[in-house]
Amino acid sequence: MHRYRFALDQVALVYGGMFWGVLFSSVAIGVLTGGFVFLILWESTSGVVLNLIGNLLGLSVILVAKIIMSQIMRFTFFAAFYRRMPFAGNIFTIIVEVYSIAISVWFMLVRTIKITVLAALYLGRIDTPLFASGVGIFGPLEIDNWPTVTRKEILIHEAHRHPYIETLGYLYMMQL
């Protein structure tokens, strides 16, 4: 709490930060958008960019099919942190892990682009740290979901090691 009671004259910096932050954020968004349009329209790079857009559209079709199949499998095999059908759930998890190894290069490239766009959007937000929790979450849309996925992994492994679950398993084993 001491950090809020010291150097109160720093509040005078807010007005300059608000002005220049909005200006820099607008320029950054303009440069990103203009650079993308320039790469599409310039003859030397238009073929490469259009080829990349075609590949991304094909990848999008594959990802939509994967999302639909994943939703069906999730509701069939899993209930919260527990598996309804452990064997089928494990097979599904192995398939997703193999798929992830092949496609995660693109996920990291997309994450780099997302973080760059978020940095451009939040450059003018002087009231929020760039990497604070909640940054990049717009209602139900979560721009960068990798931290959430990492927490889910921790919770999944910890859910099966909960003391109540281990005690219950011990009691069931003693009944055999």
Image (cartoon, helix red, strand yellow):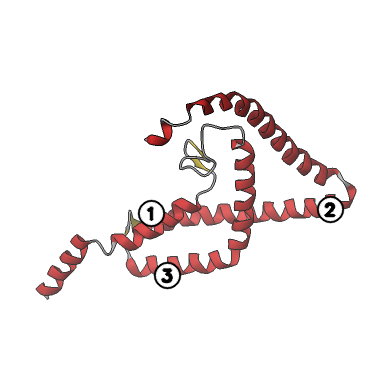
Q: Residue 8, how many percent across, how many down?
A: 48, 27
What residue is drawn where x is 89% and y is 52%?
Answer: 44
Query: What kind of element bears circle 3?
Result: helix
Q: Amino acid at mark 2?
A: Gly
| Secondary structure found at label 2 | helix
109 vs 135: above or below: below
Q: Which mark is residue 75?
A: 1
- Name the residue carrying label 3: 91
Q: Earlier in the sequence, mark 3 or mark 2?
A: 2
Q: CA distance from mark 3 to mark 2?
A: 41 Å
Disc 3 marks a residue whose amino acid type is Ile
Q: Nearer the viewer, mark 1 or mark 2?
A: 2
Marks counted in the figure total 3
Q: Give the mark nearest the N terminus, 3 or 1.
A: 1
The residue beneath circle 2 is 47
x and y, in percent, of residue 144 in the image:
53, 48
**Relative depth, front residue between 71 and 98:** 98
Q: Quadrant of the N terminus?
A: top left
Secondary element type, mark 1: helix
Label 1 sits on what residue type?
A: Phe
Q: Is residue 84 visible?
A: no
Confirm or deny contact between disc 3 and disc 2 (CB under 8 A): no
